[in-house]
Image: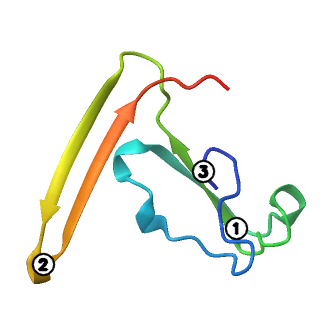
Amino acid sequence: MIDGQVVNDPLTGKIDLGLIPAGIIEKIEIYRGPASALYGANALGGVINIITKSGKGEKKGTAGVYYGSYHTQNTRLLIKIKVII
């Protein structure tokens, strides 16, 4: 889960945690054991809830371009703003 919202694939029940930028994570909560009563039938072994940083405070951002061996590359843009829905 991310901020209490289920984000795993409904068909496989999986999620690629590598797609979540580490820079937006404030804390990670781990609930061990069966939690299907609270989080649904797929929560047999436990639940991981990733809490993201809040958009409160000053607006700021970072950008980065990374190159590695075997011609691998990664670009990233993180912007911290408050979104009102």
Q: Is residue 48 above or below residue 45?
A: above
Q: Indicate which label's residue lies in the foreground, 1 or 2.
A: 2
Q: Residue 2 carries which label?
A: 3
Q: Where is residue 41 in the image (x, y as percent from the top left)?
A: 85, 71
Quarter the C terminus occupies:
top right
Say which residue appears at 70% left-offset and 50% top-offset: 5
Q: Position of residue 59 (x, y in %)?
A: 36, 20
Q: Mark 2 or mark 3, which is nearer to you?
A: 2
Tell me the CA gap for discs 2 and 3.
Answer: 31 Å
Circle nearer the N terminus (2, 3)? 3
State if disc 3 and disc 1 touch (CB < 8 Å).
no
Total numbered badges shown on the rendered structure: 3
Nearer-the-camera pick, 35 or 54: 54
Q: Is mark 3 on a helix, strand or loop?
A: loop
In the displayed structure, does residue 9 sit left or right of residue 55?
right
Pointer 2: what residue? Answer: 71
Q: Are marks 2 and 3 in contact (CB under 8 Å)?
A: no
Q: Which residue is drawn at 34% across and 40% down?
A: 78
Q: Do the residues labelled 1 and 2 touch (CB within 8 Å)?
A: no
How packed is label 2: few (under 14 Cα within 10 Å), some, or many (20 or more)?
A: few
Kind of residue indicated by mark 2: His
Q: Is residue 26 above or below residue 67?
A: above
* Crowding at mark 1 (Cα within 10 Å: few <14, some 14-19, many 20+): some
Secondary structure at badge 2 equals: helix
Dot 3 surroundings within 10 Å: few (below 14), some, or many (20 or more)? some
* Label 1: which secondary element: strand
N-terminal of the pair, mark 1 or mark 3, is 3
Quarter where residue 11 is shown: bottom right
Say which residue label 1 marks.
46
